[in-house]
Image (cartoon, rainbow, N blue to C red):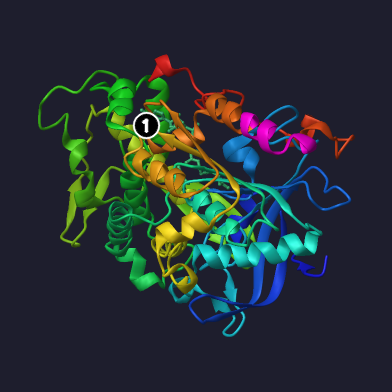
Amino acid sequence: MRYQEVHEPENPFSLLVKGQTIVEIPQVQLESGETLHNVPVAFKTWGKLNKEGTNCMVICHALTGSSDVVDWWGPLLGKGKAFDPSKFFIVCLNSLGSPYGSCSPVTRDPAVNELYGPEFPLVSVRDDVNIHRLILNDLGVKQVAIVIGGSMGGMLALEWCFFGLSYVLNCVVLATSAKHSAWCISWGEAQRQSIYSDPKYDDGYYPLEDPPIQGLGAARMSALLTYRSRNSFEERFGRGAPTPQMREKSLRTSVITDAIEAPAVSEDNCAVHNDGHYSYSSSTKVRSRSLSSNNFSLLDVKEDTSSIVNQHGVGQRTRRRPQHYFSAQSYLRYQAAKFSQRFDANCYISITRKLDTHDVGRNRPEFHNSTIEALQSLEQNFLVVGIQSDALFTYSEQVFIAKHVKNSKLCKIDSPEGHDAFLLEFEAINKLILEFEIEHVPELLMQTSDDSWSDSELGNTKESIFGEVEDPTSW
Ligand SMILES: CC(=O)SCCNC(=O)CCNC(=O)[C@H](O)C(C)(C)COP(=O)(O)OP(=O)(O)OC[C@H]1O[C@@H](n2cnc3c(N)ncnc32)[C@H](O)[C@@H]1OP(=O)(O)O
Ligand SMILES: N[C@@H](CCO)C(=O)O
């Protein structure tokens, strides 16, 4: 490769993604006019490029995903499946602003030899595809047979298509939009405000060893509610309390104590609702990381003490020990804690601001800066997949794309899961993409580009075609 490989990444989050390659582009001009230097770009590939350089499948990850497709779309990857490495040269590149290896707030700014932190410049979806194309060129790709993405990944997939039909032939978008809606912009703003309001955020100049995990966790909780649906929560949790198994899980990550019965209405039982009034000095998990040593120890569990400090520093109080709480609550708290351990607050701000820049018509005077005209200019074959219960990237937004792109097919997945169905309904998605490939890239499906491919190279993928790894009856 022309670009130099980075062998010892400084960014600890990138170490969470096993087996990816990180290369450094010397200089990149962003849409904003800013220039980035020594720009790391992380990616993973599966399968082999054919000698014509034309069997490339680009998969674009969503907001908090990484280059590791196995991690979030694993059941679609493998011989005979939608993402078949024996047929396609599959590439997934990490987006700017994400903490998983490409340039972001947790990258060192070479100009000052410090992490960019809150000074990381605004990056756009278009910046992503411009930079990712440089990597594809370097890998020898002459033509992208098919580009695929859901949610934010769908935004990138749409932007890829503006390179033209001579470069990108086919496109699959799921649960995405042609322009980020006022609704989505507003949710992003509310989530960023949760982060800003954490005192530890400190205008973004927090040490990586002591980040604003409460604010980031709260942001993830509200984001998660927009990713699912009212009915899926009702069915999954109802008014129940966590099972012993789930309770055990929560105990390992949060301050909630045990309960197996549905909560009775009493001040003691519902005291857990008041957790936010106190800052617990212990019994919560804390992150400890050492940047210099690249030693990323995610969790350092400190043992419980029985006292709490009033947030305003007014004396000591005895900690209340609530006995009952709701399963839905424990799920949210667990998810918040899990997310805070794998994501960075400045990165969350950067990547949600990137979503806000998205409008395929923006700054395209050749299409009169019109979203509709921009869509109408696209010549690729499109598969547009919407989720009937998606209240974030609504089905009507998929209809809008399909209506204005000439060669498009619109499909609906009748899932109760809401937006995240694009990461959960593997069976339906696999079928739709395979059918699209049979229609539009039959020659690639008939050839084998990599005889030596074996699915054992994929390692462990989540086996469930519904994405739920546990026994649903245990909820
Ligand atoms: C390097 C990286 O980590 S990047 C890759 C990871 N992230 C991504 O790829 C982004 C896209 N992925 C996602 O957004 C999500 O993973 C999804 C949508 C695919 C699935 O979400 P998940 O959180 O895995 O599934 P779900 O919502 O069912 O939650 C299951 C988890 O909640 C726990 N849980 C379920 N009910 C409860 C409860 N009542 N109380 C506490 N915990 C609960 C489960 O035990 C399980 O825990 P686990 O994740 O430790 O196994
Ligand atoms: N669950 C997805 C939702 C965003 O589309 C993510 O975290 O990336």
470 up-or-down from 442: above or below: above
Magenta-highlighted residues: 434-444
Corner quadrant of residue 148:
top right
Name the outermost residue toward the left: 266
> Which structural element holds mark 1?
loop
Q: Is mark 1 within 8 Å of ligand 2?
A: no
Q: Is residue 401 left or right of residue 101?
A: left
Per the image, the residue denoted by label 1 is 388
- Relative to residue 225, is residue 13 depicted above or below? below
Q: Residue 118, how many percent across, how many down?
A: 43, 73
Q: Residue at x 79, y 50 (%)?
A: 54
Q: Work out which residue is located at the far bottom of the displayed protein and give it.
A: 111
Give residue 231's quadrant in the image. Answer: top left
Residue at x-position 63% and y-position 68%: 292
The image shows residue 444 at horizontal and vertical percentages of: 78, 38
- Looking at the image, which residue is at 14% across and 31% down? 268
Instruction: Mark yes or no: residue 303 visible.
Output: no
Which of the two residues, 266 or 428, is positioned nearer the viewer here? 428
Residue 438 on the magenta segment:
yes
Asked whether 108 falls inside the magenta stretch, the response is no
Horizontal and vertical percent position of residue 151: 46, 47
Q: Residues within 10 Å of mark 1 (few under 14, many from 20)?
A: many
Left or right of 444 in this view: 227: left
**Picture quarter with the C terminus:** top left
Q: Is residue 149 left or right of residue 85?
A: left
Residue nearer the viewer, 48 or 239:
48
Q: Is residue 324 above or below residue 224?
A: above
Residue type, numbered disc 1: Gln
